[in-house]
Amino acid sequence: MATAGASRFTEVGERVLTAPPRLGAVRLVAVDGPSGSGKSTVADALVAELAGRGTDVRLVRTDDFATWDAPVQWWPRLVEGVLDPLSRGERGRYRRVEWPRGEPVAGATVDVEVPEVLLVEGVSAARRSIAELLSLAVWVEFADESQRLERAVTREGEASRPHLRRWQEFEREWFGTDGTRSRADVVLEGVGKCKISGHEE
């Protein structure tokens, strides 16, 4: 598989489109991994790859649901508001979390039309409880935890550093218990390597 630029996602896009839909008629793809590893970048690139093929694709980020105090407990809102309706061929809807003064508040309502492919990106997106609904699980990682922390702080702001340290501790425990990486169909490592079903280039 090519690893330079957008072309590194060509085979991943093929895997998505040839996988069977398991969320009703929708192919559900999860992009998961530790904070600061590049999940958002991967998800955006995969959306661009699929859209470039003429695929109707939607992206939902777990950041629209999670807060520092509830990193994964919000999951029923995503299931009831988005996954369940889409599985029935109905439009999904959820209320996004926004941070206008550094505190989470209920924000805008987001409608999710029934797509061919739904990408859910963020920590716990590929959790064990929905493994049977996933057409593809993508794991994104970057081994250096300190660098991942700095990347996340750059994105969120210096005031977030204590929260992000606690978040990293939570992630280690969550991923260890959930076994998320071991179930991934695609593993993207760092900025260049790509492993697909045990084949690495």
Image: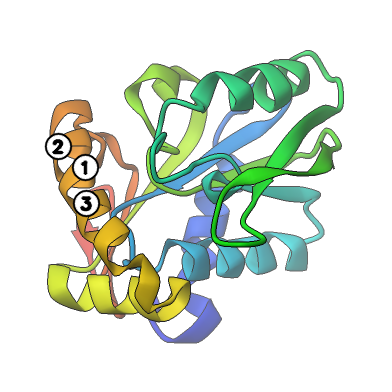
Q: Position of residue 32 (x, y in %)?
A: 38, 48
Q: Secondary structure at mark 2?
A: helix
From what the image shows, is residue 150 above or below residue 35?
A: below
Q: Residue at x 39, y 38 (%)?
A: 69
Within the image, what quadrant is residue 22 found in? top right
3D distance between C-alphas at marks 2 and 1: 5 Å
> Disc 1 marks which amino acid?
Phe
* C-beta proximity under 8 Å, tags 2 and 1: yes
**Residue at (68% x, 68% y) in the render:** 48
Q: Is residue 128 left or right of residue 166?
A: right
Please state which of residues 42 and 64 is positioned toward the viewer in this rendering.
64
Foreground disc of the pair 3, 1: 3
Asked if residue 196 is positioned above or below residue 25 in the image, the reply reads below
> Viewer-proximal residue, 113 or 157?
157
Residue 11 at x, y percent in the picture = 48, 62
Tell me the quarter of the image containing the C terminus.
bottom left
Residue at image mark 3: 166
Mark 2 residue type: Glu
In this picture, residue 201 sits left or right of residue 157: left
The residue under label 2 is 173
Image quadrant occupied by the N terminus: bottom left
Q: Secondary structure at mark 1?
A: helix
Q: Which residue is mark 1?
A: 170
Image marks 3 and 1: residues in contact by CB distance under 8 Å: yes
